[in-house]
Amino acid sequence: MSYAGPQAQAVDHGAELARAGAHVQGWGGSVLYQARRHPLGALGLLIVAAFVLVALFAPFIATHDPLATNAASSLARPGGEHLLGADFMGRDMWSRIIYGARISLIVGIASTLLGCLLGVAVGLISGFWGGWVDLVTQRVNDVLQALPLLVLALVMAAALGPSLQNVIIAISIPVIPNVARVIRSNTLALREMPFVEAARAQGMSELRIAVLHVLPNTLAPVIVLATAQLGSAILTEASLSFLGLGIPEPYPSWGRMLSESAAEYVRTAPWLVIFPGLAISLVIFGTNLLGDAIRDILDPRERS
Amino acid sequence: MTQTAAARLATGAEAAPAPAAEPVLAVEDLQTYFYTRRGLLKAVDRVSFSVGAGETLAIVGESGCGKSITALSVMRLVPSPPGRIVGGSVRLRGRDLLRLSEEEMRQIRGNEISMIFQEPMTSLNPVLTIGNQISEALILHQDVSRKAAMERAVEMLRLVRIPEPERRAREYPHQLSGGMRQRAMIAMALACNPKVLLADEPTTALDVTIQAQILELILELQQRLGTAVVLITHDLGVVAETAQRVIVMYAGRKVEEADVTSLFDEPLHPYTRGLMGSIPRLDMPETGTKGADRLQEIPGMVPPLNALPPGCAFAPRCAMATEKCQAEYPPYRELRPGHWSACWHAERLMAGGA
């Protein structure tokens, strides 16, 4: 940060105001304004938006049926009929990556939502009511957090068996303690705020105060956390699938596409490894950029 | 209403001199103790007072004298642990609030007794709109729809003279100035038309120019709605302008009580005298002895509540203190009609000695 000093040249008030966002109007206007201030975040938003659109409109973008095998085009090179080549079974890589976005998106969003929902509930209860509930949940959280996210998800996935539902549950469990921590610490500070006492003086019940007054105040950090979790959930799904505990065949998952090909074909048909890897990297990159920008935008010290 | 008026007319002179009916709020021998590691703290020790409809009672005292805890005790919002209301009664139109269940008490809070807090900056929830927060109390206590509650909220904002109430109702607290926020707090407190309003230093956090406006507003609305007001303050200037009766508290106890004119004309407790001596006055003689232009102060500090002296709590700071004061707590005596004081030497003050 620099500080205002005497100006060498005349100040263009209009330009300064525009830079400070004085003319920003409406929702679209503020998105554009923030995009200009956080160009990397805008790039992230673009990547994530493209990813979501691809997932939504997969049937229109894919050129082949992602599950259809074709012996004739086994290990076809990129270009020609198969834009990104084809795998051992002759399935079109482009189409499989497009449909793989669906799996990644579903798993990412569903597990993040589930994890955040449960994490918020746990954090709010243990922070607002405290006592032995707080003690127990915090110790359970400690144990969960002591294990790496992937190991925990691995154990969960192995215990539950591979299926879309179970993968989502397995990935969401490790999210809970992270979210609960943040919500709890926020709640601890918020419950001492005068407006909570004012709400009590209005005759509100404790439950109502927790849900109506404390919860909305904790949502900003949850949004930040959720965006960051989205990327790591997608990565965890890919890792689980890579290890054979993720989405079962024949659904295309980026992680398993990698693992199937990595050992045998990395030398002979590298496109089978490169393209799913690129897809994963690109989406993680996008969500991370977006998450960072959202954190900056929601940071009260950045707001004026 | 008309019937009682008619009845009053019929009985004529007999009914007229009757004292201001039954008090709306009557607090008797209230004792709120805090059980802490440092020992037993008698934050409120046998405090009694009552307020009638449309009347304003001021509770005055230094920080930590127990005035806020008194208000919180009436609301039954003393944090427990460590606090506990161990004795006394709080009667709202004859009903003892200390005997109600928590559920019943919630029906009273914000509905029959409301409270305004000191900090308008943090007493409003930053993520909810003003209109939303005001209508909350209405939805809670009165059987109204969300839409009707919102309309009433706008009406309340207009009542507390916030310009453009329709727009302000949709705004968030950070978009309002401190004075406006306190107005919004008042609107919130009065939304359900409570019988009693507890105002805990409502103007302390505000700009001096805004203070007068807010006080005027509270008084005006009190007259209009017939609310009984308990005003907690350390500002004697505020007391003089607003209250009919005054209680002076020191170290958790009442030390003096009188109507506002008697208190200012003839304070009968050295502590009250000390408080008055420490306010700047425009009519103070300019010429005089050395140091006449220096405000008087009360030497020393309020004793910690866990180490109160055996006698009068004010004795260590009092210029008039004698051995008797150190040894024995003075009785609370009615020295003039309606004027009470807890001082062994009140008669000397009555005689007009300086």
Image (tube, helix red, strand yellow):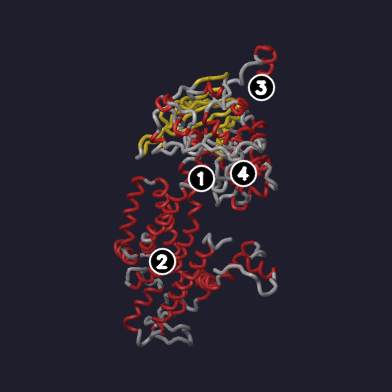
Q: Residue at x 35, y 87 (%)?
A: A267
Q: Chain of mark 4?
A: B
- The local crowd at label 2, few if under 14, some if 14 to 19, many if 20 or more residues have their Cα within 10 Å, is many
Residue wearing tag 1: A194
Q: Is residue B169 visible?
A: yes
What amino acid is at disc 1? Answer: Pro
What amino acid is at disc 4? Answer: Ala
Distance, label 2 to label 4, CA atoms, is 44 Å
Q: Chain of mark 2?
A: A
Position in image of residue B230 (x %, y %): 57, 32
Is disc 3 in the same subunit as disc 2?
A: no
What amino acid is at disc 3? Answer: Met
Residue wearing tag 3: B1
Q: Give the numbered dot on residue A267.
A: none
Dot 3 or dot 4: first in sequence order is 3
Q: Give the numbered dot on residue A233.
A: 2
Who is closer to the viewer here, B145 or A79?
Answer: B145
